[in-house]
Amino acid sequence: MTSASSKAFKQPLLSLLGLGLGAIVLLIVLIYSVTLGARDIPLRTILESFTTFDYSFDHLVIQTIRLPRSLIAMSVGAALAVSGALMQGLTRNPLAETGILGIEAGGALAVVITLFIFGSSSLTIYAGVAFLGAAIAAVLVYLLGALGRGGATPLNLTVAGAAMTALISSITTAVLIVSQRTLEEIRFWLAGSLAGRDFELFLQVLPFLGTGLVLAFLLGRQITTISLGEDIATSLGQQTIWVKLLAATSVVLLAGSSVAIAGPIGFVGLVVPHMVRFFIKTDYRWILPYSAIAGAILLLLSDIAARVVLKPQELPVGVMTAIVGAPFFVYLAKVKVKK
């Protein structure tokens, strides 16, 4: 076996090994997350809730509160990270992320308006309107960025996203000022929160979230080609319009699902793909699954920190991700965009 063929064989093997190690770390963090709460429950009791569930108080707490919350944190983290990686590859914009480009804000505004007009409703309806709001915001940001000099460049899209986020946030604030009832029902959710989520909510959003993840993974090879340049992708016979439409559909499904179940949680989709690229440089067939695992770990750790920093009180998980993500955004804005 030549050195070139040996290297080609080892690369996928090492990538698979890395995914396996990441999955093990994710499982450890998930178990630790389930053990945390206002009431101390021994690990043995936690394990018994899966093997010999008996409707005792501790078993009910594990199965109806802690486990759903941890699984939702894991799923939302994966969705946000994958959507951020998709957007960065598709637009070749290192600052692309659903929160920064206004997509999460659009989904949040749609949910707030729905609650304001119709009152409390089911999460299924919230998910639907969140998808619609996210899609409209994405289209508007792209069109606004394309109007600038040079077209939809990374800088133009970032500025357009910041402007659209500010506008949408102002409208959201105005609605909440007008309606105190809407504010009371949704203010903690708007900061990005996983508290009070249960399996019913998780199962309602899971089909949308799962479809978005599967679609993203299937597009890995095409996104890799587009990330090298649209001219290169076209010369290789790739139907870039269809790839962009499918990728945009995946982003909307992932962002809409995340906003519907946990509110707008920023910076996960910005930080994680850049962390992954320290190990996987350009191949989105690996960047996307690595981002899913790393995003799940990051949001689980953020939720753990949100629960223990001010124990017995807890912070919205969106506050913890902002503490990590905001300085990283400043660094990227200073270093990456200038290149």
Image: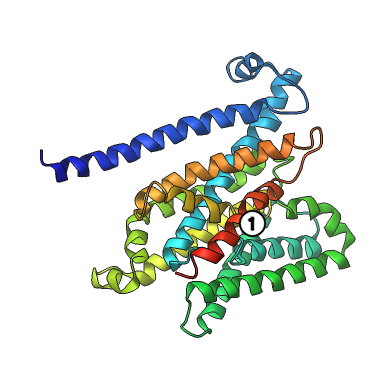
Question: Which residue is drawn at the image coordinates 66% and 52% (left, top)?
Answer: 322
229 vs 293, left or right, is left
Give how far across and how far down residue 162 sits, in percent. Answer: 63, 70
Q: Nearer the viewer, residue 326 or 70?
A: 326
Task: Give the quadrant of residue 13.
Answer: top left
Task: Give the quadrant of residue 317.
Answer: top right
Give how far across and how far down residue 325 sits, in percent. Answer: 61, 53
Task: Give the quadrant of residue 303.
Answer: top right
Asked if residue 198 shows in the view, the reply is no
Residue sitting farthest toward the left = 1
Q: Nearer the viewer, residue 20 or 113?
A: 20
Question: Which residue is drawn at the image coordinates 66% and 15% (left, top)?
Answer: 45
Give how far across and how far down residue 271 sits, in percent. Answer: 54, 52
The way the protein has been coloured in the rendering is rainbow
According to the picture, the residue beneath numbered tag 1 turns out to be 326
Asked if residue 27 shows in the view, the reply is yes
Give how far across and how far down residue 326 sits, in percent. Answer: 64, 56
198 versus 278 height, above or below: above
Name the image quarter holding the N terminus: top left
Q: Which amino acid lies under the numbered mark 1 shown in the image of this protein?
A: Ala
Question: Which residue is drawn at the image coordinates 73% and 28% (left, top)?
Answer: 37
Q: Residues within 10 Å of mark 1 (few under 14, many from 20)?
A: some
Name the image quarter holding the C terminus: bottom left
**Which secondary structure, mark 1?**
helix
153 versus 39 height, above or below: below
